Image (cartoon, coloured by chain):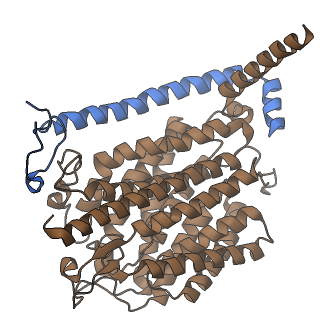
Chain colours: A brown, B blue
Amino acid sequence: MDGNLDALTTIFTEFYYWVTVVFMFLIHVGFCMYEVGASRRKNHLHTLMKNVMIIPLVTVTFFFFGWWIYWAFPSFPIMGGIDFAAGQANLPTSETMATNLGDRITGVFWAAFLLFSWTAASIVSGSVIERIRSSALWVHAVLIGSVWWIIDAAWGWHYAGWMVQKLGYHDAYASGVIHAIAGGYALGVLWVLGPRLGKFAEDGTPRDIPPHNPWMVTLGIFMIYTGFWGFYAACNVPLISPEVIGGEITGTTWTATNIYLAPTSLGAITFNFLLSLSGGLMASYLVSKGDAFWTFSGGLAGIIGASAGNDLYHPMQALIIGAIVPVLAYKLHYYVERKFKIDDAVGAVAVHGYAGFMGVVIAGFVLWGAPSSPFEGYATINPLGQLVGAIIMFGVLGFIPAFVVTKIQASMGTLRIPAEVELQGLDFGENQAYEDAVAEITRANLNLVKS
Amino acid sequence: MSTIGYSSWAVDLADVGAIYPFQGYEVPMVIVGVVFWLGWHVIQARRESEELAEAAKTASAERTKAAIERY
């Protein structure tokens, strides 16, 4: 660090990303509460452990290879090969991937991306509750969290990604790069996994499986809303000079930027986060006739639908986009459920997948012609580039890999739990131990009363 | 002698980089981590298969009914 300004900028940036990580932890807390609340009592512990163990498994694999992929894959395969030179400093064996006074940023930047990885894996986890083997889900968690989403980030969420350069792809707060891919991935798993026992009547009519604890579901979503602030802040570079960016911006005015190093501000995203949340809540309340589950989920879908362009939108645009997207996602959820017999236990495919897909496409129209980057020669934002980008996110890197891997798991008999166990509940061991312990202590205390 | 390469902080921090123990052994340390990760998956998957097979075998109608009714 040369000089006081450089030192202050470095320490501020280090602390900024560190705070976003703490906030984003709440997203995972929220997902855990949401999933457990949505599951039935016989599956609570299994549901909780399935999601909690995503944390260590994605963390270690993101350290081993996920982070390296982000830096080595931006040009691969459309504009060149794997960039081993850029990846070098981000290998797990690199000196900068450890305690190092010469590099204070890599650790917190790595962690900010890692928390996105947990989110991607957690989205899939919620949709498949009450029938998937933990071992099967954890393979998917590693794949979506440390391979597929980070490839899409290298392509479309990196200042030099080929999708940004060639397609003008713009996805500032990850409508596509996190939500569409995770939703598409969840759909690929669900397609093979099949519904929970009893979800569909013999004539194919879907049955509602109400959450065991609606209050826990509600609190879980509020936690996710809160953590989402950290997610948004983590998508920005907090403070940077045009000189450091090295692009076409003239003058000496320092700014916050999005991940593409194009200018925005925390003020802008605060307006748009809150207005898109409001649009989502209001429209979802109407379309679901006040259903709590869909109203809260719709708030989330509203943010997700506007996220691709929330660095630039006017708040009223964020409001309207945030209102339209959840309504369409809600309708699509029930259409797909009826038509294809897909049992998405928490509506993850709709809230993340469909909303994220639509958010990317809509940004192509609303931001048509705006620069995707401060660097010369990049395509500008356009509808076709966004549509192709959304298909890559949801389908190519989401649905297809999930479908193939889940098919392999199914053929090996390692995907789904036995039907007897599904009916009895996955907490069979814990519940029996609990019931036995309750019976014993109750008997013992009653004996004391008698004597 | 120091495992981190420094036995005193009487240094110019501008010249200091890595300060973790056993620098130069990053590859073996990562190999240990990868073995731990993969081994965990193998042990967990085997154990889960055994537990599910046992649970399917011992599942009783009475207990299943109770679990369903408890919601």
Residue B19 in percent (x, y) is at 17, 43
Tell how many labels: 0
Task: Give the position of the N terminus of chain A as an image quadrant.
Answer: bottom left
Residue projecting furthest to the top: A451
Residue appearing at x 24%, y 83% in the figure: A375
Residue A415: quadrant of the picture: top right
- Asked whether B42 or A216 is in front, the reply is A216
Residue B12, position as x, y percentages in the image: 8, 53
Residue A156 to residue A361: above or below? above
**Looking at the image, which is closer to me, A209 or A199?**
A209
Viewer-nearest residue: B44 or A282: A282
Q: Height in image: B11 above or below A173? A: above
Q: Check the image and report above or below for A227 versus B32.
A: below
> Which quadrant holds the C terminus of chain A?
top right
**A178 vs A256, nearest the viewer:** A256
Q: Residue furthest front?
A: B10
Residue A204 visible in the current orientation: yes
Can residue A132 be seen in the rendering of this structure? no
Q: Give percent across and percent down for residue A45.
A: 63, 36
- Name the residue located 30 percent from the left edge and 74 percent from the top edge: A239
Q: Position of residue A180 (x, y in %)?
A: 50, 66
Q: Is residue A398 above or below residue A189?
A: below
Relative side of A364 to A42, left or right: left
Residue found farthest to the right: A450
Q: Is residue A179 left or right of residue A264?
A: right
In the image, taking residue A303 as reference, residue A95 lies left or right, namely left
Which corner quadrant of the image does residue A323 belong to? bottom right
